[in-house]
Image (tube, helix red, strand yellow):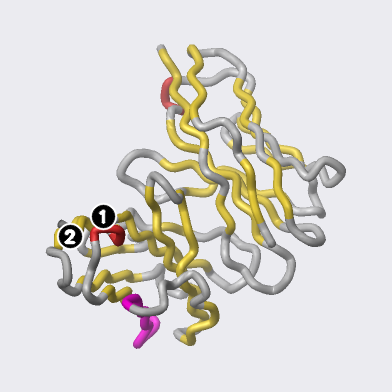
Amino acid sequence: GNSVTQMQGQVTLSEEEFLFINCTYSTTGYPTLFWYVQYPGEGPQLLLKVTTANNKGSSRGFEATYDKGTTSFHLQKASVQESDSAVYYCVLVPNTGNYKYVFGAGTRLKVIA
Amino acid sequence: NAGVIQTPRHKVTGKGQEATLWCEPISGHSAVFWYRQTIVQGLEFLTYFRNQAPIDDSGMPKERFSAQMPNQSHSTLKIQSTQPQDSAVYLCASSLELGPYEQYFGPGTRLTVL
């Protein structure tokens, strides 16, 4: 089946520290991968998207690289701000023609000023 | 563009009552999705429509949950005989086309079953 693993339930950082959130996935073939961010009281919103065509995505200072060899899609940011505090979801869309999202468990980021 | 609209934002029902949740997708979007979010299970897929036709309802609990899309401007999720374990945030999302594309999520309806 299709699955996404985010082992870090919560990450706490101080402002300007480096962020790294793990994501690994399991599926057949090469899926499309997303990172979504969810703020309190809102639905998830797209942070970045990566396909096999471009292998790397970036947005608002966040970066993620699609690694087919290790089936990983980690999220990084060089210097976090308090406003980055939110829940981050790694999302997989299989390439099988069924386009329902498969979400990871989410990682809650808390940035302390 | 108002985004995806969900009403009500909060709903409280008694055990055994019916709950109907509404979703208005972004105008022009052909695909509409429903998800359920709980602390324990996280975000789970329920069902989706393309051009108002149901495509996949594999995530829907079979007995008490149903979803419809009577026209292109709204979809409903109905839960009959609500149970405390149905308490969750129900999220609706839409995308321009069906495919590996961005889905735009509404703010969700928080359902509490007493």
Q: Which mark is residue B11?
A: 2
Q: Where does the image place residue B50, in percent across and percent down from the top left? A: 52, 80
Residue B69 appears left or right of A76: left
Which of the 4 image quarters holds residue A57? top right
The chain letter under disc 2 is B
Q: Is residue A52 magenta?
A: no
Nearer to us in this view, A12 or B87: B87
Residue B94 appears left or right of B85: right
Q: Are marks 1 and 2 on the same chain?
A: yes
From the viewer's perspective, is residue B16 above or below residue B66? above
**Earlier sequence position, callout 1 versus callout 2:** 2
Q: Where does the image place residue B57, in percent across and percent down from the top left? A: 49, 77
Q: Amino acid at mark 2?
A: Lys
Nearer to us in this view, B105 or B90: B90
Residue drawn 38% across and 50% down? B38
From the viewer's perspective, is residue B53 above or below residue B49? below
Specify the segment rendered in magenta: B64-72
Which of the 4 image quarters holds residue B9? bottom left
Residue drawn 60% across and 23% down? A19
From the image, tell me which residue sits under label 1. Answer: B110
Residue A50 appears left or right of A60: right
Q: Where does the image place residue B100, in percent across and percent down from the top left? A: 65, 64
Question: Are discs 1 and 2 less than 8 Å apart at CB?
Answer: yes
Chief secondary structure of the magenta portion: strand
Label 1 SS: strand
Can see residue B73? no
Residue drawn 53% across and 70% down? B96
Which quadrant: the N terminus of chain B? bottom left
Which quadrant: the C terminus of chain B? bottom left
Mark 1 Cα-neighbour bin, 10 Å: few <14, some 14–19, many ≥20: many
